[in-house]
Image: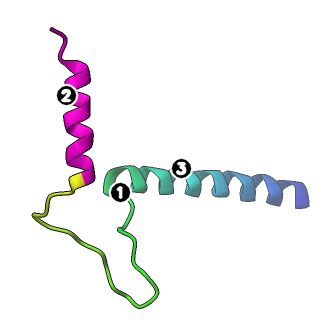
Amino acid sequence: MIYELLINLNFWSAFSGLLGSIVIFFFGLSPKIDINGQQDLILEQVDEKEKTKQIFTKKLVTVD
């Protein structure tokens, strides 16, 4: 009796984990929200650090 209950519990926990990973794959993770409820969202701004990374990477990729 207890053995069958453990097998069923193991099956459903594995099934719910698989289902959760599929949902996360299709819908993605939610953006980070801090304790105060403010959400950091940057639109149409240039990130200078990423810009310098791309310039450096572009120099590495181009072979003369």
Which mark lies nearer to you, 2 or 1?
Answer: 2
Residue in the picture at 32% in, 57% down: 27
Judged from the image, the secondary structure of the residue bearing numbered disc 1 is loop
Mark nearer the N terminus (1 vs 3): 3
User: Camera-side residue: 43 or 26?
Assistant: 43
From what the image shows, is residue 25 above or below residue 64? below
Q: Which residue is mark 3?
A: 18
Residue in the picture at 33% in, 85% down: 38
Please provide the residue range marked out in magenta.
49-64
* Amino acid, disc 1: Gly
Q: Quadrant of the N terminus?
A: bottom right
Residue 40 position, x and y percent, is: 30, 75
Which mark lies nearer to you, 2 or 3?
Answer: 2
Residue in the picture at 39% in, 71% down: 32
Residue 15 position, x and y percent, is: 58, 52
Q: Is residue 6 left or right of residue 11?
A: right
Q: Which residue is mark 1?
A: 28
* Amino acid, disc 3: Leu
Residue 39 marker: none
Judged from the image, the secondary structure of the residue bearing numbered disc 2 is helix
**Mark 2 residue crowding within 10 angstroms, few (<14) / some (14–19) / many (20+):** few
**Mark 1 residue crowding within 10 angstroms, few (<14) / some (14–19) / many (20+):** few
